[in-house]
C-alpha cells in the first residue's frame, strides 16, 4: 500500500508515469533501485528546488516502508 501511495504522489506531481525509469524498475520488482530514483526528480527547468527535494525524499521514504 505504501509503494502505491508513493507512486501515485510521484506521478500525480510529475506526470512522468510513462517515461520514468522509476516506473520500469518498480514493474521489474527492483524495488530498492526504484526507491533510489525518486531523488532524480528534483529539478524545475534546470535548477534543483528544495521543496522538490523534500517531497521526493518523503515519497522515497514512504515507498520503502513495509
Image: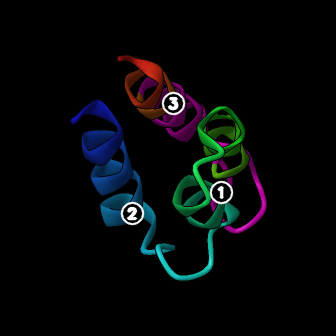
**Image quadrant of residue 3?**
top left
The quarter of the picture where the C terminus appears is top left
Q: Locate residue 60 relative to residue 7 in the image: left or right.
A: right
Q: Can you identify the residue that label 2 sits on?
A: 11
The CA distance from mark 3 to mark 1 is 14 Å
Under circle 1, the secondary element is helix
- State the residue position of label 1: 25
Give the farthest residue toward the bottom.
Answer: 18
Q: Nearer the viewer, mark 1 or mark 2?
A: 1
For marks 3 and 2 on the same chain, the one whose residue lies earlier in the sequence: 2
Q: Residues within 10 Å of mark 2 (few under 14, many from 20)?
A: some
Residue located farthest toward the right when viewing the structure as drawn:
46
Q: Is 46 located above or below residue 19 in the figure?
A: above
Residue 22 appears left or right of 3: right
- Give the residue furthest to the front: 29
Which class describes the residues within 10 Å of circle 3: few (<14), some (14-19), or many (20+)? Answer: many
Place of residue 63 in the rendered image (x, y in percent of width and height, measured from the top left): 42, 31
- In the rendered view, would you say 25 is above or below 53? below
Residue that badge 3 annotates: 60
What residue appears at the point 53 percent right and 26 percent down from the top-left corner? 57
Q: Position of residue 21 (x, y in %)?
A: 69, 64
Marks 3/2: CA–CA distance = 13 Å
Q: Which residues are magenta?
A: 42-58
> Which residue does the image show at 66% across and 32% down from the upper left?
32
* Element at label 2: helix
Amino acid at each position: 500500500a505504501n509503494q502505491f501511495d508513493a507512486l501515485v504522489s510521484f506521478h500525480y506531481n510529475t506526470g512522468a508515469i510513462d517515461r520514468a525509469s522509476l516506473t520500469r524498475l518498480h514493474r521489474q520488482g527492483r524495488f530498492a533501485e526504484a526507491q533510489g530514483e525518486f531523488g532524480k526528480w528534483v529539478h524545475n527547468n534546470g535548477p534543483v528546488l528544495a521543496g522538490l527535494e523534500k517531497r521526493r525524499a518523503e515519497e522515497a521514504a514512504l515507498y520503502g516502508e513495509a
